[in-house]
Amino acid sequence: RRRPLSYIVPKYPMMQLFTTAAFAAALMSGVSGFSSQQLHASRAATSQLKMSSSSESSRRDILSNAASAAALGISALVIDPNTASAASLRTGSITPQSAANKAAESYQGVYSDPNHEEGYRVIMASGKGATMTLSDGGSGDETYKNIPVGVNGNELSFDFGFKGGPKGVIAVLSDDKQSITFPDGNSWTKNQNKYDGIYKDPKYPNGYRVVRKFRGDTKIINFITEVNDTGNAKDSVFCKGSHASLFSIPTAAFTFYDLPGTSKPVEDEKPTNIVSYALQRPADYSNGVPTLGQFSLEESNSVFPYGTITFPDKTVWTRI
């Protein structure tokens, strides 16, 4: 069965090139709303590229057809952030937006505890302190929510009495804000999977998005996102997703399934964004309606700043 685009792309560099080009074109042309039509075209193009890899002329034909179908000068937007082709997007030094994003980072984030490799801890500011969601992982393990955490400068105080642990434990946040160390020497690492973290969507200032590794048994779904628009945990919606190879970081393509506000396009609907009707093919909705996002840890990229996930409608989630 056909695998999600973001799973296929890493094995075929030419496909990643086309996907990034299509995404960049969508971003710069101001596509309206979360759309999966770009993915339809990319799937078709990547399928063609895979079958034609043995012929240099057919590769040229495919890329030529893809570019003309996009009708947006895609040849000028073939931007792979991990190659020299990205030079036009890189400033050579940290951009003001990336600098601001790094400066705004705090103790908030998704933490990994080496004593509970299958679990996670999400620490988020709340009032004058913070709250924590904690899961140790494992079959049938309970997830504890809204656990109070005291914050005093670089010191965080924890009460683990809710699971029979000690109370009044003082841990210290590292100077680079990337870990918390406890008196017994144990250290929690923040955003260990590179993309982990708490993100803010400017459309929902009271809400948040928590992106973390999916602890399931599938090779296709590898991360999960808690989408919350109000700040009230009862309003959270959880969406699974798949990402391209993390070896491509500082940038990587992420596919989110069934994000709130997305819906399956009308059958045979003609695309109106960056691709022609000739390139559209039926999409695989077995995992849900896909939405493509570009994750970036690049500091000098003028389009995809450090600590962001950027979507085709120009929505940018920024990690805090």
Image (spheres, helix red, strand yellow):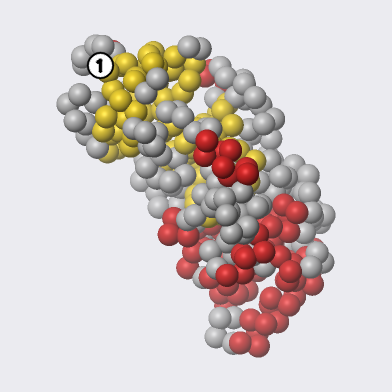
Can you see residue 278? Answer: no
Tell me the residue at 79%/54% (across/down).
Answer: 29
For label 1, the SS is strand
Mark 1 is surrounded, within 10 Å at the Cα level, by few (under 14), some (14 to 19) or many (20 or more) other residues, namely some
- Looking at the image, residue 49 lies above or below residue 111: below
The reply, left or right, for residue 272 in relation to residue 280 is right
Q: Nearer the viewer, residue 202 or 263?
A: 202
The reply, left or right, for residue 188 in relation to residue 128 is left
Residue 317 at x, y percent in the picture = 60, 38
Q: Nearer the viewer, residue 314 or 46?
A: 314
In which image quadrant can residue 277 be found?
bottom right
Q: Residue flagged by tag 1: what amino acid is it?
A: Val
Residue 188 at x, y percent in the picture = 30, 33
Tell me the residue at 71%/65% (across/down).
Answer: 77
Tell me the residue at 20%/24% (across/down).
Answer: 183
Instruction: Write down the residue under mark 1.
Output: 169
